[in-house]
Image (cartoon, rainbow, N blue to C red):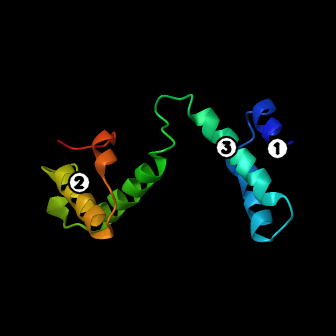
Amino acid sequence: MIVAALIIQPTVSFHSIVQPLARAVLAGEQGAREKLSRVADSRAAELRQHARAQTAKEPLRLFCGYLREIFVRAAAPQLKPPLGDGWHHCRQFAMEVFAIAGIEHADFDAHPGKAD
């Protein structure tokens, strides 16, 4: 069983288990969606045991990481972190993107990279 492989063989990467299942779901294989769901649920339960992994906030963290990378690559040199108020400008950029996209950002205050 795939879930057992993750428990028995901790050296097996989660990605190497999930990718074939995701392909099977896309190919419409019978039972693939249920298997993928079980593996994802198992991994989420495992992550809930770690203090820094908050599964409800991980999509927001990933999105913030993408926004940070966009800002660092696109901002004028004098606005980039770690120079002066660079992180403040980056946070303002992210908050504007959230506002424009209509994303509720109450959890942003709990983000570990929060400036201020």
Q: Position of residue 112 (x, y in %)?
A: 33, 39
Q: Secondary structure at mark 2?
A: helix
Q: Amino acid at mark 3?
A: Asp
Residue named by callout 3? 41
Residue 18 screen position, x and y as percent: 72, 53
Residue type at numbered disc 2? Arg
* Residue that numbered label 1 is attached to: 2
How many numbered discs, if any? Answer: 3
**Residue depicted at 82% across the width and 36% down the height:** 4
Q: Residue at x 81, y 31 (%)?
A: 8
Q: CA distance from mark 3 to mark 2?
A: 32 Å
Q: Residues within 10 Å of mark 2 (few under 14, many from 20)?
A: many
Q: Does residue 94 appear in this view?
A: yes
| The C terminus - image quarter | top left
Q: Position of residue 92 (x, y in %)?
A: 19, 58
| Mark toward the viewer: 3 or 1 | 3
Q: Which residue is mark 2?
A: 91
